[in-house]
Structures are given as C-alpha cells and as structure tokens.
Image (cartoon, coloured by chain):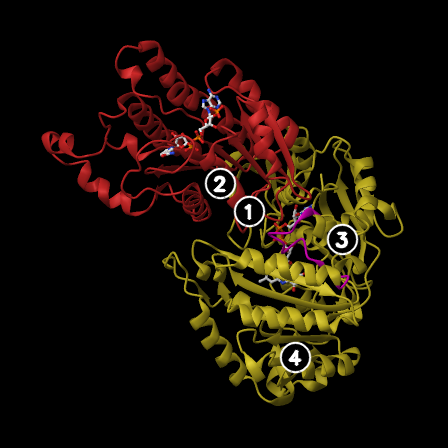
Amino acid sequence: MSNPSRARLWGWGHTKPTMAEEVSVDRAGVAGAVKEAGERGILARGLGRSYGDAAQNGGGLVLHLTSDASEVVLNPTTGFVTVGAGVSIDQLLRVIVPRGFFIPVTPGTRFVTIGGAIASDIHGKNHHVDGSIGNHIESITMVLADGSTTVIGPRHNPALFWATVGGMGLTGVMLDASIRLLPVETSRMRVDTSRLADLDDLMASMSQGDDDVRYSVAWIDLVAKGRHLGRSVLSRGDHATLDELDARQGVAPLAYGPRQLASVPPLVPAMGVLNHATVAAFNEFWFRKAPSHRVGEIQGIGAFFHPLDFVGAWNRLYGTRGMVQYQFVVPFGEEQAMRTVVERLSASGAASFLAVLKRFGAANPAPLSFPRAGWTLALDLPGGSRGLDDLLHGLDRVVLDAGGRHYFAKDAHMTHEAVRRGYPRLEEWKAIRDQVDAHRVWQSDLARRLGLI
Amino acid sequence: MENALGQPQTIVLLGGTSDIGLAIVRHLLNPTTLAVVLACRNVEAGERAAAGLRSDGVVVDVVAFDGAATGTHAEFARSLSDKHGDIDVAIIAFGILGDGSETKVDCDAAAELTNINFTGVVSSTIAVANQMRRQGHGSIVMLSSVAGERVRRANPVYGATKAGIDGFAQGFGDVIAADGVHMLIVRPGFVHSKMTTGLKAQPFATTPEKVAAATVKGLRSKRRIVWAPGILRFMFIVLRHLPGPVWRRLPLG
Ligand SMILES: Cc1cc2nc3c(=O)[nH]c(=O)nc-3n(C[C@H](O)[C@H](O)[C@H](O)COP(=O)(O)OP(=O)(O)OC[C@H]3O[C@@H](n4cnc5c(N)ncnc54)[C@H](O)[C@@H]3O)c2cc1C
Ligand SMILES: NC(=O)c1ccc[n+]([C@@H]2O[C@H](COP(=O)([O-])OP(=O)(O)OC[C@H]3O[C@@H](n4cnc5c(N)ncnc54)[C@H](OP(=O)(O)O)[C@@H]3O)[C@@H](O)[C@H]2O)c1
C-alpha cells in the first residue's frame, strides 16, 4: 500500500471536485486498507470515467487498485476470462481480441475498469439483445467491510451479487471477476449506416429492425430545430466474419492495437470551446458526413465502439465549468415523453454535442441497475449553461412521470425524490447493503448526495 | 452534498434573521435542498423567518447561536454536522452596526461590537470551516463590506471590524482552499435592510435581493470576491487612493 496522499478528485464532467486521501493498493493490500477506514469511509475508484461524483469520497479514503495485463487469465476452451477489477477494458481487449474473443458489453470508451463497469452495470450498443455487463458475470471476488474476502455470483450469494452489480462500489471492493466472453472470428465490424430525417422516423426504424442486429445506436442532432428536429444517423452492425473481410484484411483477421491519435492541447480557454455555435457546426458536419444509406462497411473496433477515445481528455474542451451528462430511460409506450425531452432540449438552445439514442432490452435482477426495457437518451451539456438547473429538473419530471429513471454513473444533479421514484427497489438494495456494511465503511459523494448511505 | 450545478442540499445561516443572509438562502433554495439551518440569537424571530422558507421536502431548523459566545462555536459547528450531515454552504451574516456612541464615550460598546463582528466572526468561521475541511468540500460566504475598504469617520469601529474579517477571509480562504473549501468574500455597499433602517442611503444603495443574486453567481463560478453592486469595485480603486484631506471632505456621513 502506498502512503495516502491528499488529492482533489473529479468526475469526467469536471464539475464538483472534493478532497480525499488517495492510496494505491494491489489486491493483497485491500483488506489492510479497509482497516484504515475513518468516519468518512472508503471507496474504490477505477479510471474516473463516471461523469459526476460516483468515484469521489470527500474527506475519506479512495482506493486505486493497481493492475496489469498479467491479471487477465483467459481460458480459450470455455471462453471465460478471469480479470483483475483494476484492469481496463483497453488492457483486456489487447489480450483477448488477438485470441478470438470480445468483451460481451463495452461502453463508449475503453478506458473504464472492470470494477467500474460492474459497479455501474454498464450497457453497450447491444443491450437490446445481450443485456448489461451483469448478465455475463460468472463470479466476483470481493473484499467486504469486515476485511474478509468472499466469492459471489448469480448462483452463489445471488442477493449480494445483484446488489453489487450496479451497486456503485457501496457493497465492497471487487478484486476480480470471471466473465463469459463472446467468440469472434475477426477484429473488424460490419456496419450499416443510415440517415433519418426526424425523431419519429428514427424510432420507427429502430423499433422494426433492431432485434435482428447485435449492435444498434443512433446519434441525434439536438441543436437542429424545426423540421430538422431529431434528425439522426443510425448505425448498426455486428462482428465481421472471416469471409466478410477482403484479402488484405484477411491476412491478420484478429489484429488489434488501437492508438490514441491526439490529445486536447493543455491550453483550452476557461470558458471552453464547445458552445452553441461550435457544436451546431460540428453537428451539421457530422450529419452531412454520414452516408444517407450504406451497408456492409468494414470498420475497426475502435472506430465503431470507442470513437471518442481517438482524442484523449476531450472533456477538457468544456473549460473550467466542465460538463454535465444527462442520461435517462423511459419505458416503451412512452415515446411522447422522449419527444417532449428532445423538443425541450432543442428549444432551450443548450449546446448538446453527441446525443445518443438507443433501445434497451429487459432489465436484469439487480435492484439498482439502470437499464430497463425502453428508450434511453444520453447527452452532454456545458456545465455553465444558463438555466441548466431548471431545464434538467424539469426534464427529470417528464422522465419520472413516464415511469423512467436516470443513470447513477452519469448523474450530477438528481433529487432524492428522483431516486426514490426511479428506483422503487432502493429499500430492498439498502437492506442487503445493511447486512454487509452496517457501519458504512463504503461511502461516496454520490451516495451522500443521493441518500444511498 | 452540493451537485454539479452548484445547488446546495444543506445551507447554514449564521445570523439567521439577517435580511441579506435570508435573501441569499432564498436564492440558493432549489429542488435538491434538504435542510436550512437558521442560527439566531433571537430564536423567536428566527422562527418567523423560517416560516417563509419552509416547503415540501425542506427542513428549516432554527437553532440558538450567539456570535459573541466564542467558547460555544466549536461544539455548535459539530452539532450541525451531526444533525444534518455535510454542510454545503455556510453564510456568515451576523453583525451589528453600532450607533456611533462607541467611538465617543462608550468603550464597552466598542468592545462588544468588535467581539461580535470580528472575534465572533473569526471564531465561528473557523469552527464551521473545520467541519467542511473534514468533508473535503463546502463553501463559506463571508459578508464583509465596503466599509472596511477605507474606514470612514462615520463608523470607525464597525469599519475596522469589516476590514479585519475581510483580511482574515482572504488569508484563511487560501488555507482552506487546500482542503477543498471555497471562501467567497462579499463586499456590499449600502444595503436597505434592518441594519440600515432610518439611515440616509449612500450612493449606489442596493437591496438584499441584488446582493443575493451576485453572491449566488459568485458561488457557482467559484469567485473569491464579489462586490455588490459591481461598480463599487471600480469606485474603491479611486476612493482608496484619494489623499486624506479630500477623502475626509467627501459627504459620506
Ligand atoms: C466517453 C464515455 C462513454 C461512456 N459510455 C458509456 C456507455 O456506453 N454505457 C455505459 O453504461 N456507461 C458509459 N460510460 C460510463 C462509464 O462506463 C461508467 O461510468 C463506468 O463506471 C466507468 O468506469 P471507471 O473504471 O472509470 O469507474 P469510476 O468512474 O472510477 O467508478 C465508477 C463506480 O465504480 C466503482 N468501482 C470502481 N472500481 C471498483 C472496484 N474495484 N470495486 C467496487 N467498486 C468499484 C466506484 O466506486 C464508482 O462507484 C461512458 C463514460 C465515458 C466517459
Ligand atoms: N446593510 C448594509 O448596508 C450592509 C452593508 C455591507 C455589509 N453588511 C453586512 O452584512 C451582514 C448582514 O447584514 P444585514 O444587512 O442583513 O443586517 P441585519 O438584517 O441586521 O442582520 C444582521 C444579523 O446579525 C444578527 N446578530 C447580531 N449580533 C449577533 C450575535 N451576537 N449573535 C448572533 N446573531 C447576531 C442580528 O440578529 P438580531 O436580529 O438578533 O439582532 C441580525 O439578524 C452583516 O455582517 C453586515 O455587517 C451590511
């Protein structure tokens, strides 16, 4: 265990930092660190890709699990991998893709840890067919509040397992997880792209075609107004098979080694460079660049799943006020609520870069898991936008009235009431947590803010 | 725990019946707010103020607090955290103006004024800040005054206490910044409030509401100093450097 050092910790949105004591530990050191817990408790932190304060613990201890690729143990016969919780999806893919496997769920960035992925029960473009990451976990090794180590899974201590999936680090520190992988023939994606004129068009075509494709997601221009409102680019695909590659690609079908091309220069003006004008221009460019209809294009994993990773630290483009990410889900049948949200965002004049719409499949048994059957929308907004507070609390009411909810990993503003209404199984989760952590060893800023502890 | 939009959940007002302080509280109230604590020496008056703030989901807690009783401050601040959890914003708004007698015959009155406005402010600010340092976050609003920018003959003792807490807040703000705590110094000019009732308004007189709006803006953008109204900042660049004979002849009361 390294010596604790005082650190100012932020979420990816760079909005509300707090000071904590930070330590790096390897898996053997976690139990020892737990004994150091003071009244402000302990929290595990991954790569800090949560947008709000989920990975912060003001005044308390924050644990960083050290990791390296040697903690990736693949069994190619069974297709299971056991991977250290501090290992990133980036590190994992570099080991498993060349050997013909893919992670069953990846978020829009590969710079998240396995621990962070499970704690948020992350979803990907395939949620409508494959569910979230929790659906693919065989077991988790975890250190509990009393310093003991236990193994949990959907068949072994399922209550604690499902409370840990989506449990935001508040049930214990995960050391490793065993994950069922997806076998792939190649490291390429076969992608179909089409442009759609408006939101109704988009929702109609997603409702029809989605169930036949593994990956599906749409990008919506929320800056566009009037008849362009909701214009979008729908992208669908699956892992390319060997015979879908051309001769040149077929030479090394499983080659994988994504590079980060550029980083944001260190000097971004304090007010940021993403404002209504620049975002509108970017969105226009993005929409026009997309083909009106193209099928069977072969893309790399990085281009298809992690386009933002080509630019490091892009969040800094928002300047000192940072950004807020807003993600919610509303059930199928509540399309009108989605329309209302899109209309209000467009009318508000807020500069939303990259709004992503997707269809979720069924929820899993985890009481705090975010995804449930319905439509989910995710978007970034500059943190300093005027009227943002009223706008977001207003949208919250639309979402909650429609029976929807918001994503903890992205949240930065919710009320306690929004949590209670969105997560009706909160008390069930708390009861399980109370059994394993009566004294609140596990604490976070998010947990304090949303009344989870 | 304040959210990313700068909306506090827990707000504490020291000087719980202060007109300016209550205006700031009203501007800070938001859908996430859980608790407002009005710390008053006159609890009955505090209850009347509380009635105007209560709404669904917000607990307004009126507690006894004497700014002059420095020996009680540490325990007072601890009890706030025990009862309400993390304190997001604390507004230090208590103070008295005095009536000028303290500069003539009544040195006891001068000492009392100093004890409330300076000693008590310093002591209670440190007590509250210590709770925030433990949390690793929080914001303190220090109600200073332009009266401390250049002390006038109308209120030398009051002016000196304001100069004193302003200087304290600048230096102490840098100390607690290292622990994640934000100090915002607010320097209002003449404000129409119960402190100034019956006095002749000064140039650029303003209202508690306007001071509150400027304060909340300053909190959200993490400013160090806010002037209310903003023009006073430029006025005082000049006033501070006027030669003494000219300054003394200005009609500033
Ligand atoms: C560009 C971008 C795109 C994204 N796209 C998606 C997406 O498509 N789908 C999606 O679901 N999410 C998405 N996210 C969100 C991201 O996947 C989650 O926030 C994820 O939790 C981040 O992982 P992390 O390792 O950075 O964890 P952190 O942000 O550091 O921590 C998140 C939570 O995990 C807990 N945690 C971390 N490690 C452990 C451990 N070892 N044991 C116990 N708890 C632990 C923390 O306590 C905290 O509560 C995206 C984020 C970004 C920045
Ligand atoms: N008004 C102005 O023109 C002006 C200008 C610049 C700065 N300020 C400063 O702004 C702050 C707020 O002033 P205001 O205009 O809002 O005046 P206010 O309404 O008179 O508020 C001052 C408050 O301090 C309280 N108080 C006094 N002594 C106390 C003590 N020993 N313990 C606890 N509380 C005590 C008073 O309570 P009681 O009701 O019990 O007396 C009163 O509620 C003060 O620091 C003031 O100096 C005011």
Q: Whereabouts is ligand 1, in terms of quadrant?
A: bottom right
Say if residue B86 shows up in the picture.
no
The reply, left or right, for residue A393 in relation to residue A211 is left
- Mark earlier in primary sequence (4, 3): 4
What's the mark number on residue A199?
4
- The image shows residue A262, relative to residue B68, as above or below, that is below
Say if residue A28 shows up in the picture.
yes
- Residue identifier under label 1: B7
Question: Are marks 2 and 4 in one subunit?
Answer: no
Of circles 2 and 1, the one toward us is: 2
The reply, left or right, for residue B66 in relation to residue A92 is left
Q: CA distance from mark 2 to mark 4?
A: 43 Å
Of circles 2 and 4, the one toward us is: 2
Secondary structure mostly taken by the magenta-highlighted segment of the chain: loop
For chain B, give the colour: red
Q: Which residues are magenta?
A: A402-416
Mark 4 surroundings within 10 Å by alpha-carbon count, few (fewer than 14), some (14 through 19), many (20 or more): many
Residue at image x 40%, y 58%? A271
The furthest residue to the right:
A155
Q: CA distance from mark 2 to mark 1?
A: 16 Å
Query: Mark 3 belongs to which subunit?
Result: A
Image location (x, y in percent) of residue A63: 61, 40
- Check contact, mark 2 vs mark 4: CB within 8 A: no
Count of number-bearing discs: 4
SS assignment at label 4: helix
For chain A, give the colour: yellow
What's the mark number on residue A421?
3
Image location (x, y in percent) of residue B46: 57, 28
- Residue identifier under label 2: B23
Which quadrant of the figure contains the C terminus of chain A? top right
Residue type at mark 2 is Ala
